[in-house]
Image (cartoon, helix red, strand yellow):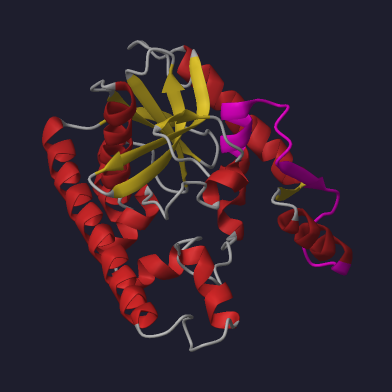
Amino acid sequence: MIATPGLYNLPAAEYLADPVVEPSLSASIARTLLDRSPRHAWHEHPRLNPLFQPDHDEKFDLGTAAHALLLEGPGEDRLVTIEADDWRTKASQEARAAARAAGKVPLLGRQVLEVMAMVSAARHRLTAHLDPPMPLAHGMPEATLVWQERDVWCRARLDWLHADHRTVDDYKTTVGSANPDAWTRGSLFGLGYDVQAAFYLRGVKAVFGLEADFRFVVQEAAPPYALSVIGLAPSVLQLAHRKVEYAIDRFAMEVKRQLDVLDRQLAEREYIAGPDYTIADMAIWPWY
């Protein structure tokens, strides 16, 4: 378990399981707290919910595969090619299930070709980007930051942290338009990506003491795979930081509430459900 704030290089599965000494707040949990409720955030948290199960949605597979190849290169072993025309056969479905169980992304052969074309187009367009630093270059992919704000542990997995720690790039794919105006009006606020940007920047400041810049690298998932590099206005980030502050407060209050319930329960008995050690004590262990 990580008990020291800093920069870490972790496998995706380890990061997603929450490797911090106490249940930590991530950007996705922060968005759930803001958009839904503490109960929803509890349900989606891998440490707070003893029955937590990762959710896989096939519609994100192409984007996840492009993300892995573009950021981590052709040696990335998270992808599995299934030699089939579609997913209708029992054999292809079993192969897909086995790949998911191993924490990998299953793709049909034709989908692999689509992803390779998409990544090739992205690299070509990024090479031509004029404003330094070049996006998704000269830095660390999938960088994990762990820090504390007040009594809350926080964690973030940055798509790309530049070597000087002054720029963070985040790669997004979209079935819609990568036009900056259209994407900003839709996905940026609709999917809470403004909160993600502010949350990551807080992590950089906490770990390195730097005020960094944040850029979204947005690419369309269909030919010609148009791509835009999008920054955020100071006013947008200012509002997003206020949202993050509220999410941190809600997370801290909910954890404190749960600990208070636990303290009251254990003040009157040796174990959660009475005088004997039971499955209730086992189930509550992952919470804390």
> Which residue: 18% across, 55% down?
246
Q: Nearer the viewer, residue 263 or 19?
A: 263
Q: Is residue 64 above or below residue 57?
A: above
Image quadrant in which you'd find residue 76: top right
Image quadrant in which you'd find residue 164: top left
Image quadrant in which you'd find residue 135: top left
> Which residue: 31% across, 56% down?
31
Q: How many marks?
A: 0
Which residue is most to the bottom?
274
Which residue is most to the right?
91
Q: Is residue 228 visible?
A: yes
In the displayed structure image, the side of residue 201 where residue 78 appears, left or right? right
Image location (x, y in percent) of residue 52: 54, 68
Residue 51 is inside the magenta segment: no
Tell me which segment is drawn in magenta. Answer: 66-90
Residue 88 is inside the magenta segment: yes
Q: Is residue 55 above or below residue 234?
A: below
Q: Quadrant of the C terminus?
A: bottom left
